[in-house]
Image: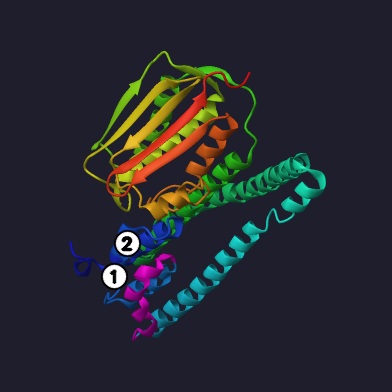
Amino acid sequence: MENSEKPWAERLAEVEGVRSHLEDHYGDAAAVERLAGFIDDEKWEVRQAVAEAMLNVPDNDLPRFMFLEHDVNSFVAAAAKRTLQRRSVYVDGARKRERQTSTLFRNEETLLKKFGPEAVELARRDVALAYEVTVGSVAHDIRGIITPMKAKVAQLGIVIDGKLPVKEMQEARRCLAMLADRTEMLERMTDDIQTLARKTPQGRTRESVLDLLRNAHDVLMDEFSAKEREIAGIAVTWEVDPHLTFRVSRQLMIRVFRNLLKNAYESFLVGVDRYADRGNVEVAARRVNDGIEIVFKDDGMGMPPEELKVVRQFRPRGASKKLTGSGFGLAIAYAKIIDHKGTLRIDSKEGEGTAVAVFLPAKEGK
């Protein structure tokens, strides 16, 4: 069904959905293309929602949306102008954060010359500890706010059920569904922030590589099933010796593997929560010198060189075409692998796929 043939409330809900995904996954090409289909919608409410979604449209796609600033409807034009002003503020803020990052260790050279490398290392450890304590504490407080919010959103849905006119009831349900989705996203992000900030336990247990990979895959499949994501066309093959073992923090490593498997599956995203009809994910593990190498390979969308360069920084919210997730998955995987004295390497070509290689010592830890 073409957009013009759909009821305007349905069109508005679709734009809001695309806007929601763009807020979490800036610049996704498929989502931007869907949004562009509503630029000249006959309903001003729909065009206003498009104007507000311009905030997360990449610069190279922005000209397609710019004429909304001069829309015949004053509400649409005002929304577009506000959005463009916010974009300017966001750009300035990003530049400011970049300057702050570049000067974070501005005294390192002075410390090195005056006190030597040991003092520099101690200073970095203090910074890491301060980060862990501060971010962990803030994430804990945020969780304390989110938990009652979730309960109230659910309670509100019960309270208003059947007590409003049909049109208002539909709008209320749409708003509640959006609130529930956002609070769930905040909860996932908070959990990921805590995991990233929390120090990795030193205790290790000897685990089967295949068992941990299978557990991680089962966890991911349960999540996809709960979200009703259709991934039946994506085939997974395993080349893992059942006798391979290593010493790791079990639950953390399951989470690491789950994150990497999720990235592999999501390389086949072709739209908002829509996956390609076919695709292949290969998981292989082998003994390499004094450790184990696990490779996650897909033949999905891949990444261009400029995006791969950003992803290889392993920072939260790295460049991505995905439409789901908190943006912390790869950063968590990298940090926890490093804590296990391992390494993580990514190679990718746009249109051909991605390969992620994890190396973990076979005898790490106690």
Q: What secondary structure is marked by label 2?
A: helix
Q: List the residue tagged with mark 2.
A: 14
**Most foreground residue, 344 or 263:** 344
x%, y% of residue 348? 36, 44
Left or right relative to 119: residue 164: left
**Residue 320 can be seen in this image:** no
Magenta stretch: includes residue 295: no
Q: Is residue 304 above or below residue 362?
A: below
Residue in view at x 40 percent, y 37 percent: 356
Image spot of residue 76 (x, y percent): 39, 79
Instruction: Identify the main secondary structure in magenta.
Output: helix
Residue where numbered disc 1 is placed: 38
Looking at the image, how many numbered discs can be counted on the residues? 2
Q: Please tell me which residue lies in front, 298 or 24.
A: 298
Left or right relative to 43: residue 285: right
Residue sitting nearer the eye, 360 or 78:
360
Q: Residue furthest right?
A: 114
The reply to whether callout 2 and callout 1 are in contact (CB within 8 Å) is yes
- Please name the colour scheme applied to the rendered image: rainbow
Quadrant where the C terminus sits is: top right
- Kindly give the residue lying farthest to the front in the view shown: 113
> x, y (%) of residue 23?
45, 60
Looking at the rendering, the stretch of residues picked out in magenta corresponds to 56-72
Residue 298, image x and y in percent?
31, 38
Q: Which corner quadrant holds the N terminus?
A: bottom left
